[in-house]
Image (cartoon, rainbow, N blue to C red):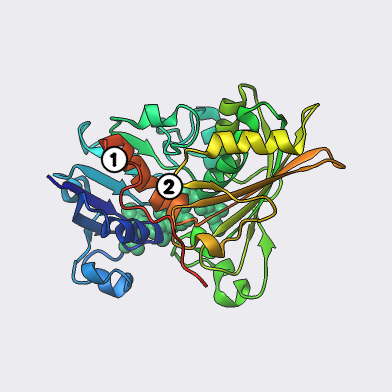
Amino acid sequence: MAVRAAVAGASGYAGGEILRLLTGHPEVEIGALTGNSNAGRRLGTLQPHLTPLADRVLEPTSAETLAGHDVVFLALPHGQSAAVAERLGDEVLVIDCGADFRLKDAGEWERFYGTPHAGTWPYGLPELPGARDALRGSRRVAVPGCYPTTASLTLFPAFAAGLVEPDVVVVAASGTSGAGKALKPHLLGSEVMGSMSPYGVGGVHRHTPEMVQNLSAVAGEPVTISFTPTLAPMPRGILATCTAKARPGLTGDRLREAYEKALAAEPFVHLLPEGQWPSTAAVYGSNTVLVQVAYDEAANRVVAIGALDNLTKGTAGGAVQSMNIALGIPEETGLPVIGVAP
Ligand SMILES: NC(=O)C1=CN([C@@H]2O[C@H](COP(=O)(O)OP(=O)(O)OC[C@H]3O[C@@H](n4cnc5c(N)ncnc54)[C@H](OP(=O)(O)O)[C@@H]3O)[C@@H](O)[C@H]2O)C=CC1
Ligand SMILES: CC(=O)N[C@@H](CCC(=O)OP(=O)(O)O)C(=O)O
């Protein structure tokens, strides 16, 4: 019997990408689609690429409209998920694309988000050690932020093998869809086109504690991370350059072996052949993360670079991957691994 899935926030970027993937998922039947200011409108006017669903009309987002489904995807602004989720019942699989349930440390949540902490759900980054076990059979999933997905998948093999010091620098560029569809003056076409600009500089971006949480768990000790996000003039994609000081005795061969071992069985994280480096264009629309790593001997630093599509593996693809695991569906079902080129 098909899994019946509802999508809250279907008018937004993340909701639209979830629907793009679910329309091709053989086990899923799409149920209620909800919006907020766009409730009552035809989906085709908001998401014209979702042609099979063009005549579906958005309902208001409420526990009532989302009831009666096996899975509910929440693609809502931060702070909106808890009130909906708590009325959906424990047997429904609720997958939250927002940040509300990602962090374990309530103090860190309050410091970066400025609101009371709603709680912690199993974290939807299956590739991290132990994550698949926590997701299997779970009825709640917190989908990671797009930058933490990129940096964590790019660096965890180095930490898992104990090859680097717990002192990391991440500089990442993101496409503009990462900021959502709502109008923001710094995202107007004339502000973004032909320019790259940093934001959230100096340890203040809310994804910093999420990266720290992930990599500290893998390292088995506290990791500090200096994270600088930048905005790039492209609709989708993240390219993260991550560096960490090497531990004594590291060689390029040992580093490569550690990455090969950690990533060999991963369907969605692909270590490129030596000498080839990731690009955002190569992962456009796919659930793949491309990774490459090098040992910069003169600077004694590991340089690891990862690229993904922020809306696919960075949000919706990760969400569907976690749904598959939670429901016992083969993990790769319905998820593209091939990008769009040129
Ligand atoms: N974009 C990305 O790359 C990523 C996004 N996420 C997370 O996914 C979630 C959605 O992001 P995104 O799709 O980019 O954002 P958008 O701004 O594109 O979409 C937001 C959605 O939420 C709805 N909405 C707005 N306000 C409310 C409200 N008060 N109550 C209920 N629904 C509301 C909107 O409805 P309407 O349009 O009808 O008003 C719209 O459907 C966010 O939590 C975001 O952090 C996570 C990882 C990456
Ligand atoms: C380009 C851009 O603005 N990106 C967003 C992150 C997108 C993401 O992963 O979001 P959530 O944590 O909100 O789910 C930002 O930096 O705020």
Q: Residue at x 60, y 28 (%)?
A: 160
Residue that sits furthest to the right in the current view: 298
Using the image, determine if residue 192 lies above or below residue 201: below
Taking depth in this image into account, of 60 and 251 the one nearest to the observer is 251
Image quarter for residue 118? top left
- Category of crowding for the residue at label 1, using alpha-carbon neighbours closer than 10 angstroms: few (below 14), some (14–19), many (at least 20): many
Q: Amino acid at mark 1?
A: Val
- Which residue in the structure is indicated by mark 2? 78
Can residue 264 be seen here?
yes
| Residue behind label 2 places its C-beta within 8 angstroms of ligand 1 | yes
The answer for how far apart the CA atoms under marks 1 and 2 are is 15 Å
Taking depth in this image into account, of 228 and 183 the one nearest to the observer is 228
Using the image, determine if residue 187 lies above or below residue 15: below
Taking depth in this image into account, of 253 and 54 the one nearest to the observer is 253
Position of the N terminus, as image quadrant, is top left
Residues at discs 1 and 2 in contact (Cβ within 8 Å): no
Residue 72: horizontal and vertical position, in percent? 25, 45
- Which residue in the structure is indicated by mark 1? 94
Question: Mark 1, mark 2: which one is toward the viewer?
Answer: 1
Residue 212 in the figure: left or right of residue 134 = right
Taking depth in this image into account, of 126 and 185 the one nearest to the observer is 126
Residue 259: horizontal and vertical position, in percent? 61, 38
Q: Amino acid at mark 2?
A: His
